[in-house]
Image (tube, helix red, strand yellow):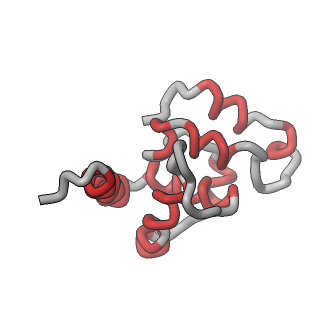
Amino acid sequence: MSIGCETLLQLLNASEYAAGQGTTPGLGAHVRSCPNCQRGIEQFSIAFIAQNVLTCEQCRARFPRYYEATRPEYALVEMAEIEIAEIAVHLGQCADCREEYEELVLLCELEERDEMV
């Protein structure tokens, strides 16, 4: 999990977010490049979490796009920074969704390596 991700903490302390802009520039790029944060951000602003609450259904519906958008080697789709952050936060807070996302990642990685049985 992303506890201790210094880059994440720096982004969360960015002055634009603190000034009430509602998003942190660079957060989506960081999530795309940090394998730990891709799987869920646990440490996040309480204000952001309260403002950007996804239901499990909404989060799970975005899994395929999120997976493709956060591939560091080749992002196949674009997602708004706020969408990436919302999903990463939800994954950090919801064990059920995190488990389901981990299963999706495993299946996708097996398929990409052509190791599906």
Q: Residue at x 88, y 46 (%)?
A: 19
Residue 94: % across, % down:
39, 55
Residue 9: % across, % down:
65, 31
Give the quadrant of residue 84: bottom right
Residue reaching furthest to the front: 114
* Horizontal side of residue 16 vs 52, given as left or right: right
Give the quadrant of residue 80: bottom right
Q: Is residue 55 above or below residue 66?
A: below
Residue 1: % across, % down:
42, 36
Q: Residue at x 52, y 43 (%)?
A: 73
Number of labels in the image equals: 0
Quadrant in the picture for the C terminus: bottom left
Is residue 41 among the parts visible in the rendering? Answer: no
Give the quadrant of residue 72: top right
* Horizontal side of residue 42 vs 98, given as left or right: right
Q: Is residue 57 above or below residue 8?
A: below
* Horizontal side of residue 117 vs 85, given as left or right: left
Is residue 25 among the parts visible in the rendering? Answer: yes
Q: Is residue 34 above or below residue 38?
A: above
Q: Residue at x 80, y 46 (%)?
A: 17
Residue 114: % across, % down:
24, 54
Q: Is residue 13 above or below residue 58?
A: above
Q: Residue at x 57, y 39 (%)?
A: 33
